[in-house]
Amino acid sequence: MNLPSDPIGVFDSGVGGLTVTRALVDRLPGEAILYLGDTARVPYGNKAPATIERYGLNIARRLNDTGIKALVIACNTASAFALEAIVKAHPKLPVLGVIEPVAQQAAASTRSGVVGVIGTRGTVASGAYTRALHEANKDLQIISHPCPLFVPLAEEGWLDGAVPTEVARTYLAPFAGTGIDTLILGCTHYPLLRPVIQRVINEVVGRQVEVLDTATATAKVLDDLLRAQALQAPRDSPAPAHKFWVTDAADSFKGVSTRFFGSPLGHIEHVDL
Ligand code: DGL
């Protein structure tokens, strides 16, 4: 039974989902979050689809068992490979991935009809963005490229300067001459590199490109979903106490997490799955 007073479960392979959590907390300040970062098994981006599905099912079961009213899969790779299985396994739990909300937003905002997508190898190979964008508008042209090195750069805090700029130039060069006017950051790590990505994509394409991330669009769709299902936290409930769980060393997560969440997380608990 999902209760309005229950927290919202959120999970990612590690810290990336904290960019989505930031947007959730900003948009829904009355809601408590239970976040699980699967730091023992990160990265997801280069693992087989069946492995990611198994990880996702495992995490969803664990979060659901503790009592959550909705689940946000705050990882593009897990949204691409595990969403369907999780929805099937938990028919009564509202489950939201991060791909569809931003795909809808991009489909509504593109003028040229050509949308670029960058993400992990897994996300790009899955074709999940192409399917979601075509569902919104079958006439769109979609051009996707994996940018795997953006993940370690974001985690190391190498967010601008010579190395990230050179990596971005190399990854984004194939978008030259394609006519994209919108670029989706299809990985929850990439918003940290937004300034360099924005600068380089404008340079490569020769015009201002709209860069969209998954966080804001997902927060809006979750807001609508909670409202529609009468699952919003009661107005008179106390200030929400967020919980942060990791499956590997909590200490190493702490430093990096501040950069992704924008403020310190407080207590981080280690859990075994
Ligand atoms: N945060 C993951 C995503 O959005 C990428 C990191 C990883 O490879 O685990 O796909």
Image (spheres, rainbow, N blue to C red):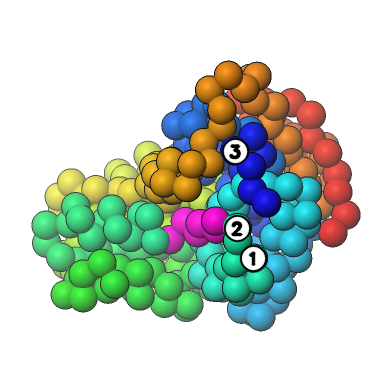
Instruction: Report the residue marked by disc 1.
Output: 90
User: Residue 4 — which label?
Assistant: 3
Name the one closer to the observer, 159 or 187. 187
Quadrant housing the C terminus:
bottom right
Crowdedness of circle 1 by 10 Å Cα count: few (<14), some, many (20+)?
A: some
Kindly report which numbered mark, 1 or 3, lies closer to the viewer in this rendering. 3
Q: Is residue 226 left or right of residue 38?
A: left
Badge 3 density bin: few <14, some 14–19, many ≥20, Cα 10 Å? some
Inspect the magenta stretch and tell me whether residue 253 lies in it: no
Pointer 1 or 3: first along the chain: 3
Q: Position of residue 246 (x, y in %)?
A: 78, 47
* Residue for badge 2: 93
Q: Which residues lie in the magenta part? A: 94-99
* Amino acid marked by disc 1: His
Which mark is first along the chain, 2 or 3?
A: 3
Q: Is mark 1 within 8 Å of ligand 1?
A: no
